[in-house]
């Protein structure tokens, strides 16, 4: 199954601009779900261009943004070089041995699962989250249901743009109910 590795620089620039508009919808709710975050260690898995990571750092969290795309990480490090309590690391959420057990008060994962290729990887991601999350920690995740991208009339162009040949089942992830 093909999934994006987010390596194309032109795609990343276009995607970053689209994300800024789209994240305004879910960003506030994710922040609200986290509750008070000042001084808390938070991991943002699949941080992409770092918009959510930066917003949480601005609210006083000690942030680690992780993404499997080196290009995203390079962009984030450059763009947010002067932001306190914020660092970025290239990593696959499937296996993050460099992170200590129970080292985060919260983990956020925004718009990631749709891009994971296998249900086994999804399980491993959730295992890693459980491992790095403190006892009693908070895990907040969100994702886009594929019907939103399969039905062009449902989602206005300003939120999502996919090529006319895009298919959730070849370019996204396909899961069988009950496996995850």
Image (cartoon, rainbow, N blue to C red):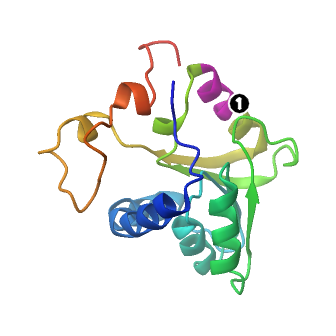
In the picture, residue 5 is in which quadrant?
A: top right
Q: Foreground: 48 or 29?
A: 48
Q: Which residue ends up furthest to the left in the rendered image?
A: 153
In the picture, residue 73 is in which quadrant?
A: bottom right
Q: Which residue ends up furthest to the bottom in the rendered image?
A: 82
Q: In this view, does 106 lie above or below 54?
A: above
Chain part drawn in magenta: 120-126
Q: Is residue 43 above or below residue 124?
A: below
Give the mark count.
1
Q: In this view, does 157 lie above or below 135?
A: below
Q: Residues within 10 Å of mark 1 (few under 14, many from 20)?
A: some
Residue in view at x 65 percent, y 54 percent: 106
Determine whether, in the image, residue 47 is placed left or right of residue 74: left
Question: For residue 68: magenta?
Answer: no
From the top left corner, tell me how far across and down residue 160 is, in percent: 29, 53
From the top left corner, tell me how far across and down residue 137 is, in percent: 67, 49
Q: Foreground: 88 or 179?
A: 88
Determine whether, in the image, residue 31 is placed left or right of residue 46: left
Label 1 secondary element: helix
Determine whether, in the image, residue 23 is placed left or right of residue 118: left
Q: Foreground: 163 or 106?
A: 163
From the top left corner, tell me how far across and down residue 80 is, in percent: 65, 79
Residue in view at x 35 percent, y 31 percent: 168
Main secondary structure found in the magenta portion: helix
From the top left corner, tell me how far across and down residue 12 is, in percent: 50, 61
Determine whether, in the image, residue 169 is placed left or right of residue 120: left
Question: For residue 125: magenta?
Answer: yes
Q: Name the residue under label 1.
A: 127
Residue in view at x 84 percent, y 49 percent: 99
């Amino acid at each position: 199954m093909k999934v994006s590795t987010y390596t194309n620089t032109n795609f990343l620039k276009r995607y970053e601009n689209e994300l800024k508009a789209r994240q305004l919808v879910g960003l506030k709710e994710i922040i609200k779900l986290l509750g008070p975050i000042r001084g808390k260690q938070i991991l943002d898995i699949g941080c992409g261009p770092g918009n959510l990571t930066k917003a949480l750092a601005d609210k006083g969290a000690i942030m680690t943004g992780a993404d499997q795309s080196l290009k995203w990480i390079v962009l984030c490090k450059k763009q947010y070089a002067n932001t306190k309590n914020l660092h970025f690391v290239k990593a696959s959420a499937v296996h993050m041995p460099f992170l200590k057990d129970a080292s985060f008060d919260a983990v956020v994962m925004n718009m990631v699962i749709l891009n994971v290729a296998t249900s086994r990887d999804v399980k491993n991601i959730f295992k890693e989250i459980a491992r790095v999350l403190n006892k009693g920690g908070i895990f907040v995740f969100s994702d886009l249901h594929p019907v939103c991208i399969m039905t062009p009339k449902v989602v206005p162009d300003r939120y999502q743009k996919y090529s006319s040949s895009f298919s959730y089942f070849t370019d996204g992830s396909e899961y069988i109910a009950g496996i995850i």
